[in-house]
Amino acid sequence: MRGPRTRPASIYDALRRFAEELWLPYHRDLAATVEAHALADRPEEELIAENVAFHRDLLEEGRRGWVAVGETGTQEPPTDGRLADDFPPNADLAGFVLTGVDACPDVFDRPDRLVIGDIYVAEPHRGSGLANRFVERAAADAREEGCPELRLDVDVDNERALAFYEKAGFSDYRKQLTMSADAV
């Protein structure tokens, strides 16, 4: 990123911008591919406000997030910066990754895992290597937290994401099944 870095007026302002420019487009893209991700039929402003509150709570609970800041149209992966930290008000927000620790109780013989909650790369930055950098950031986060493994969930009909994760080295671990409670 070029130019001076300035701090958003507040964490609220940074999270609001994150929700407007990254989270909402991410879920619109996902809803176009994965029916289960359709957004609620509510005004956009309500969706954004609830997302700001949700992510603020996650950050207060110790979850982490990184937002990539770059120039639209560049093929060079943008630099990454911590979510709700420094990024210029007019910077292009290129994508994000959210992580958290899945702590394992001592009664089980498995290590804690770092969970990648979401990875999203905005359209102009796809193919730039940014998604790989987000996985690398998550792996560094895992090492910092003492977690020897990464874990994530991906929708079975999100073929683009599945292909990326498999190419990145992720493999099947568990199969999740769902059904309607009314079907029983």
Image: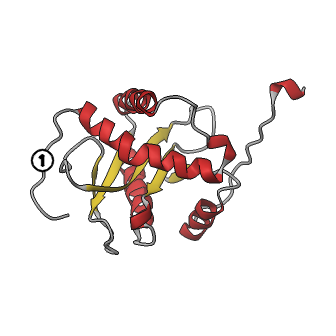
Q: Is residue 132 left or right of residue 87?
A: right
- In the image, 6 versus 103, the foreground residue is 6
> In which quadrant of the rendered view does residue 165 lie?
bottom right
Q: Which residue is mark 1?
A: 6
Residue 97: x %, y % from top left: 42, 51
Above or below, 159 against 104 in this view is below
Residue positioned most to the left: 4
Name the quadrant of the N terminus.
bottom left
- In the image, 44 versus 58, the foreground residue is 44
Count the marks: how many?
Answer: 1
- In the image, 156 versus 3, the foreground residue is 3
- In the image, 43 versus 84, the foreground residue is 43
Please report the residue visible at 33 percent of the width from the left and 70 percent of the height from the top: 73
Q: Secondary structure at mark 1?
A: loop
Please report the residue visible at 54 percent of the width from the left and 45 percent of the height from the top: 111
Q: Amino acid at mark 1?
A: Thr
Please report the residue visible at 62 percent of the width from the left and 32 percent of the height from the top: 107
Residue positioned most to the right: 184
Residue 32: x %, y % from top left: 61, 51
Residue 147 in sight here:
no
Residue 100 in sight here:
yes
